[in-house]
Amino acid sequence: MAAGDRTPFVLTWRPSHLSPPDPVDPVEELGATEGYWRGWVSACTYEGEWRDAVVRSLLTLKALTYAPTGGIVAAATTSLPEKLGGVRNWDYRFCWLRDATITLQSLLYSGFQSEAKAWRKWLLRAIAGDPAELQIMYGVAGERRLDEYRADWLTGYDGNPVRIGNAAAEQFQLDVYGEVMDALHQGRRAGLKADDPAWGLQVKLMDFVRQHWTEPDEGIWEVRGGPKQFVHSKLMAWVAADRAVKAVEEFDLDGPVQEWTELRDAIRADILEQGYDHERRTFTQFYGSEELDAALLMVPLVGFLPPDDERVTGTVAAIEEHLLKDGFVQRYTQHPDTDVDGLPPGEGAFLACTFWLADNYALMGRHDEAREVFERLLALRNDVGLLSEEYDTEAGRLVGNFPQAFSHVPLIDTARTLTDAVAATEARAREGRR
């Protein structure tokens, strides 16, 4: 074919024991497909400066959705390495509870109620039952068994092993309880049905959090070096208690609000005492450690402390000094003599963490820096606007599974945060001139 040529074709697959499907007109089907996607995304309510990037990310989330159940997979691929030639490569074709909060909020804030409802229904079905049996991830239809193994008979990308399944499904990750509680609370605030069995399930989840929040876990980064008292996990346990209290106060739901208020205060005090390094003026990765963790950029984003609090600004400064590399944020410090994650050190910059840094800048009023970081991230997208999980600053290329929901969701959120922050500053300036 040459430039300007147009050659339609149809590629069809079927089980060998079934008859071929009815033939289709490729030109007609292409038009119908384009019409469907244009019609769907026309509901987007974001009208800010970065609408095109937001729309592309929303399309990506929709395309990562399993239509029969509403489950949204983390990525469509497995075993694309986070470090070229390394062993950090996993199967991401599953639904993480952790993604529920940010995905649900992004869909709701962007005007997509039906998709948010479907995702919420998937979430409730997946976690129904005993909170002690809750998994941090499930299959697209809520499957629980996700045994991990290496498919050694396959040649992986760049010589990396190919993994099927994900052993992290068996880990205890305390933070997911906070993310689930936050997701369901934000759903109620946005008008999703409040008088359903979800609240009874949330009460059970809070019983579990109350009994287990002091235990170590594997944390947001799903470490394979053994459980720790991760500060981010405690932070999200605080979120669980906080959202439970607010649910009772805002929606007149029935629950032991005094008990939850005391729990919230106890977790907060514990974090500030054991998770904050007063000498270095930063939150640390886990209690008693000197390690840093970009997940603590979530402290102001979830409402634990205001963005101008010195403990927040100190943490941001520490991350800028030790985790910001070539303009992008690493997940956490990886010293050769430590074994926190149980894997050899070295990986790309985690894109979600860099979006969180831009959010912090925006909330602090550092708008120019927030815009600079955000535009730098947008420039990483490929020719059709997609992002993977990480970026290798040395190789100058995207790495990790692709396309990655956990990169596109914070893109949407940061666009909104920066737009709202700039608008609020301009409004204050106008008010001051009157």
Image (cartoon, rainbow, N blue to C red):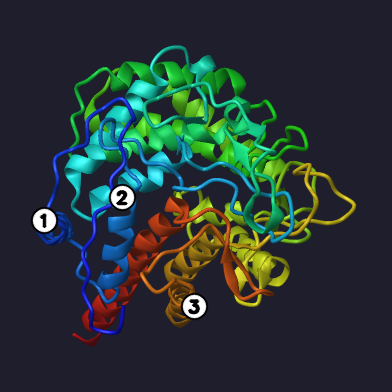
Where, by quadrant of the figure, is residue 198 drawn? top left
The amino acid at mark 2 is Ala
Which comes sooner in the sequence, label 2 or label 1? 1
| SS at badge 3 | helix
Which comes sooner in the sequence, label 3 or label 2? 2
Foreground: disc 1 or disc 3:
1
Foreground: disc 3 or disc 2:
2
Residue topped by disc 3: 376
Q: Nearer the viewer, residue 382 or 189?
A: 382
Residue topped by disc 1: 32
| SS at badge 1 | helix
How many neighbours does mark 2 have within 10 angstroms: few (below 14), some (14-19), or many (20 or more)? some
Residue topped by disc 2: 63
Where, by quadrant of the figure, is residue 426 drawn? bottom left
| SS at badge 2 | helix
Tell me where residue 344 appears, x and y as whole percent.
Answer: 80, 51
Which comes sooner in the sequence, label 1 or label 3? 1
Q: Nearer the viewer, residue 169 or 155?
A: 155
